[in-house]
Image: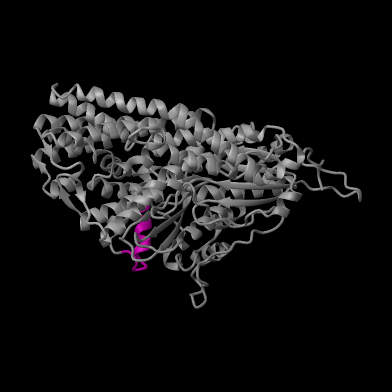
Amino acid sequence: MTSPAGLPPTGGGSSGEQQRLKLLAVTACPTGIAHTYMAAEKLAQAAEQLGVDIKVETQGSIGAENVLTDNDVRTADGVIIAADKDVDLSRFAGKRVVTVGVAEGIRHPERLIEQVRTAPVHGGGGGGTSTSSSADSGAGGKERSVGYKALMNGVSYMIPFVVVGGLLIAISLSLGGHTDPSGGLVIPKDSFWMDVNNIGVIGFQLMVPILSGYIAYAIGDRPALVPGMVGGWIANTGSLYDSEAGAGFIGAIVTGFLAGYLVLWIKKVEVPKFVRPIMPIIVIPIVATTALGLFFIYVIGKPISWVFEHLTDWLGGMTGTSAVLLGAILGLMIAFDMGGPVNKTAFLFGAGLIATGNQEVMGMCAAAIPVMPLGQGLATLIRKRLYTEQERETGLASLFMGLFGISEGAIPFAAARPAQVIPANMLGGAVAGALAGLAGVEDAVPHGGPIVAVLGAVSGVPMFFVAVVIGTVVTALTTVALVDVSERKRRGQSMVDGLAPQPELALAGVGVGSDGLGGGGTATAHAPAQRTSSAPASTGASEDEVLSGYLTAQTVKVRLDSGDKEAAIREMAGLLAATGKVTDVEELVAAALRREEQGTTGLGEEIAIPHAKTDAVTAPVVGFARSAEGVEWGSLDGTKAKLVFMISVPEAAAGDEHLRILALLSRKLMDTGFRERLMTAPDEAAVLDVLREIR
C-alpha cells in the first residue's frame, strides 16, 4: 500500500508498469443540485486527462450515493474536498487532503489534482472540513470559516426542534387555552391539550442543547457532542447558577464553541498508548463535560445572574419615566436574546407589575414579543433569494409562532446571522414597544402576541396591532437590508479571490437544508459512472420519452427563435404548453423570471437551465431548445446560452425524481462531447437520441 505521507511517482512499479495515482473526492454544497455534480464531473474529466484514477462521493440535496468505503480510503493516495458545507474528515486520517469551495472543483480541477501531491496530511483530529490540516490547502478556493460551518451545523440540527416545539405549543394554546389574569394563557391540567403542550415544551427544552452540541460536534467530532449538549443544557438552566433565566441560545453558542475547542485541545495531549483507545469514548467526554459544566456554573453563570438582578433594579427605577422611552428599552431587551437573561428580565418586570395594577408595561412587552418571529418570517417572503429553502420553510413556521407570541421562532435566524438579525430584531422590538407605550396599550396577562388580543386580554387593540405590524415591517426590512449588504460583501470578496459565486439550481420545496446530504454517483476516470435513481422505470413509455418521460418530442425545438432571455423563457414556456401540462403560460413565465431575479440560471459552458416551481403546471415537464447565435443569459463565464433546458414542476410535486433528473442533467452537460452532439444533432429525433445517453 502506498504510504499516505508520500504520493507515488507516476511510474515505477516493480513490474515496470506505471503505478497510477488513486484519488478520492467529495463534492458538496448546502442546497446544491447542479454544483455538486458539475464539480464531480469536472474532477472525473480532469483525472481521466491526467491519467489518474478518482472516485467521487457527492453530497447535495437528494441523498448521498457512492459513499466512499473504508477500502477506498485505505488504498487512496489523496483526497480532494470541494465543498461549501461541513464534510466529515475523520475517515481520511493519514491521507493528504485538499479542501476548497465547490466552485474551485468546477473551475480548476486539474490544479486540485496536482496539489494533492504536496497537500498536508490530515491528522484525523476533527470532524469536519474545519480541521487544521485542511483549513488552508492553498488551492485558492474561497472556503467558509471554521466558526461559520460549526454554527450552521448547530442551527440546521436545531431548526426541527424549534419548529416542532413551537408549533405544538401554539396549537395547544390556541385550541385548549384561555386567558387568566394570574396565569396568562392557561391550559387546563390533565387535558389532552396540556399533553400536546408538554410535548412541545420538551422540544423547546432540547433545542438549546442541540444547538450547542452540534456546534461542538462540527469542531471536535463525536467526543465533543456530549460536553456540547450538557453545556447547552446548563446554559439554558439558570437555576444551576442562581439565575431566574438561563443564558438561552447565546449561551448555547458559547458552550458549543468552548466544548468543541476544548475537545480539540485535549486531543493534542500526549497520553500512554494503552489509554488511547478509551480517550474518545470515556476520557475526553468526561473531562470536557465536567470542566465545561463547572466553568459555566462558577465563572460564566455568575455574571449572567448579576446582569439579571441589576437590570431588574434598573428597570424598577424607570417606571416614572416617559412611556415611549420605557417601551423602547423594553422592546430592545425583549428582542435581544429571545429567552435569555435580558429578555426574561424585561418580561418578568412587566409580568410582575400586573399584580400592582400597572398593565401598561406588560402591554409594551406584549407588542414587542411577536415582532422577531413575524419580522424574520416576513423577511423570507420579501427576499426569497437571500434564504435557503430550509430557511424559507422555517420562516413560515416562524410567522405562525409569532401569532401566538412565541419569540423563539426567530432563534434559528438569529443564531445563523447574529450580526444582521439581532440588530434588526432589536430595532423592530423597540419601535413596537415605544408605540405601545405611546398609545397606553395594556395587557392583563403575562403573555404576548396577537393571540392575547384575540382572546380579549389587551386594551387598545387597534393600536396594539398597529405597533406589532410596524415593528414587524421594520424588523423585516432591516433584516433584508443587512443580510443583502452582507451577501454583497461576501460575493464581492469571492470575486476578488477569483471565485465568483456560481448560479444555483435551487428548486423550491426540496425540504432539506445545510445538513442534508446530496445524491451522486460514481465518477471515476476510465470507468463510466454508475448512476442509480429511485425514479420508476420507463417501461411502457414511448420510445421518444427521455428523462423519465419529462422530455418528449413535443418539448424539443432544434432552433430557438428568441434573441433575449425573457423572450426565450416565453418561447420555452409555449413549448412546454404543447404537452397540455401547462394551465397558465403567463404564470409559468412569471415564475421562471422571478427565479432569474434571484440569480442567473446560466451555468456557463453555453448552457442555461431556467426553471420554475409553480401550480401553473400540473406535472413535471422538461423542454429543450437550441440557439445557433446564443442568448445572453448573464452566465458568469460570459458565454451566451446555446443549449437551453427549461424545467417546470408543480408546487405540490411529491418525491425527488425531478431533482435526480436535474442532477443527472447537470452532470452530463459537463461532458464536452455530449454538448457537441446536442449542438450538431440535425433534428428532434436526433436530439432525443443524444439525450438518451443520460443514465
Q: Is most of the magenta stretch helix, strand or loop? A: helix
Residue 686 is situated, as x and y percent measured from the top left of the image, at 54, 65
**Of 555 and 362, the residue lying toward us:** 362
Q: Count every numbered label the image shows and give the total.
A: 0
Magenta-tinted stretch: 569-582
Task: Answer above or below: position of 318 versus 470.
Answer: above
Q: In the shown orientation, is residue 275 left or right of residue 544?
A: right
Residue 200 is situated, as x and y percent measured from the top left of the image, at 34, 53
Q: Which residue of the protein is positioned furthest toward the right in this rendering?
A: 15
Task: Answer above or below: position of 142 versus 409.
Answer: above
Colouring convention used in this rendered image of the protein = one colour
Residue 570 falls within the magenta-colored stretch: yes
Q: Is residue 634 visible?
A: yes
Residue 454 is situated, as x and y percent measured from the top left of the image, at 13, 49
Residue 616 falls within the magenta-colored stretch: no
Q: Can residue 428 be seen in this view?
A: no
In the image, what residue occupies the spot 32% across and 42% down? Answer: 408
**Of 181 and 216, the residue lying toward us:** 181
Q: In the shown orientation, is residue 569 left or right of residue 686?
A: left
Can you tell which quarter of the image residue 572 is in?
bottom left
Which quadrant is the C terminus positioned in?
A: bottom right
**Of 442 and 559, the residue lying toward us:** 442
**Of 95 and 453, the residue lying toward us:** 453
In the image, what residue occupies the spot 39% across and 53% down? Answer: 508
Residue 452 is situated, as x and y percent measured from the top left of the image, at 16, 46
In the image, what residue occupies the spot 41% across and 42% down? Answer: 208
Q: In the shown orientation, is residue 359 left or right of residue 639?
A: left
Q: In the shown orientation, is residue 487 left or right of residue 472?
A: right
Q: Which residue of the protein is positioned furthest toward the bottom in this rendering?
A: 540
Can you tell which quarter of the image residue 97 is in?
top right
